[in-house]
Image: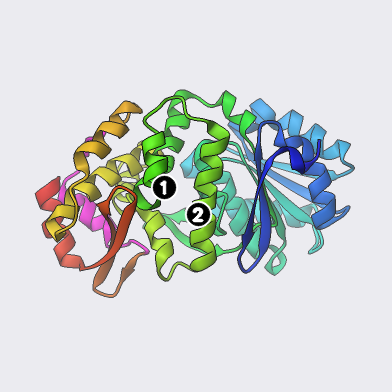
Amino acid sequence: MTTDTYKTIHVAASGSYDIIIGDGALACLGERLHALVGNCRLALLTDSNIDALHGAAMMKELTAAGYDVCKYVIPAGEESKSAENMLAFLDFMARNRLTRSDALVAFGGGVVGDLGGLSASLYLRGISYIQVPTTLLAAVDSSVGGKTAIDIPAGKNLVGAFYQPRLVCCDTRLMDTLSSDIYRDGCAEVIKYGVILDAALYDKLHTLPFDRIDVVARCVEIKRDVVQEDEFDNGKRGLLNFGHTFGHAIEKLSNFEVSHGSAVAKGMVIAAKMAPLFGLADVEKPLTALLEQYGFDLGCPYSAEQMFDVILSDKKRRGGNLTLVLPRAIGNCDLITVPVDEVLVKLKQVI
């Protein structure tokens, strides 16, 4: 099956690449790899859940395409996005004698994609890598745009690099094996895209189930456009963080027992509550209603002071200021620079 069968979205950033989206898209992975990286060796990074479900099929696909593949499996879960796991994986690639002409395939959700991307940027000062997202969240968000990172004790995604993949291959059929909770996590990011930049997408999401391929493609188009305008996150790309400043704080305070999507949903509601305090629109009720339609628990179990203490380590803080993403209307968000101390004052009013 050729890539003409699937939706293809091209990203023209510091590294240009295609994002292929469709049911059964893995069938064209070998063909595309040969065109991009030739007949090299591959390091396949995945997690224990994906390996159990799809590891054998992926190995069969890659070896049938003529590739010599060494596989490395990390435990499933956010706690695996650590310096220890990254160093162990880098050592694994070195012991398997991968060279600069070889490539890495990150096969999994956001944890695998982030860890794999950062490892690719560091190994031998940079090798090619391919993202094969297996979750809705990774497909619409973390696999696209070149942000790679690991977590450290001080906070989430604080050690990372901008490093674009050579290809993103999104086989939406893989999402059929996701639990309802994991799939719902991705829906939070999909709703985010509607709130920040596409009211028509937001309206479409009220009808369930939505057309998965079309919605994934639209979210990827939005992210592609933002990344091409602001690849290194100095301006408009900050809009993609709607709900994330507060969501990341909730994740860390829960020791990552609250999943990323659930935390982002809570964070979006906090941001929506905060917007009127800055003279912006009040979209809390319609946003809350949509998130509740998807089954999200939107309560925040932490105090303003607890949240603020974590937010002080947020990557979006510049000196004494923090940039918040707040809605002016559904489909139109703004970046608002706020003195850090004022964030605590406002948090006390909405939590």
Please tell me whether residue 264 belongs to the stretch shown in magenta: no
Residue 276 position (above or below residue 188): below
Please give the name of the residue rendered at 20% of the width and 66% of the height, measured from the top-left corner. 340
Residue in front for this viewpoint, 223 or 156: 223
Q: Are marks 2 and 1 in contact (CB under 8 Å)?
A: yes
Amino acid type, mark 1:
Tyr
Secondary structure type for disc 1? helix
Q: How many numbered callouts? A: 2
Locate residue 36: give its quadrant. Answer: bottom right
Residue in front for this viewpoint, 115 or 299: 299
Q: Earlier in the sequence, mark 2 or mark 1?
A: 1
Tell me residue 322's x, y (percent).
27, 66
The magenta stretch is: 297-315
Helix, strand or loop at mark 2: helix
Relative horizontal placement of residue 153, taking residue 140 as reference (left or right)? left
Crowding near the residue tagged with mark 1, few <14, some 14–19, many ≥20 C-alpha atoms within 10 Å: many
Residue 4 percent location from the top left of the image:
76, 42
Residue 302 lies within the magenta run: yes
Marking on residue 193? 1
Amino acid type, label 2: Lys
Q: Is residue 229 left or right of residue 322?
A: right
Q: Position of residue 303 (x, y in %)?
A: 16, 46
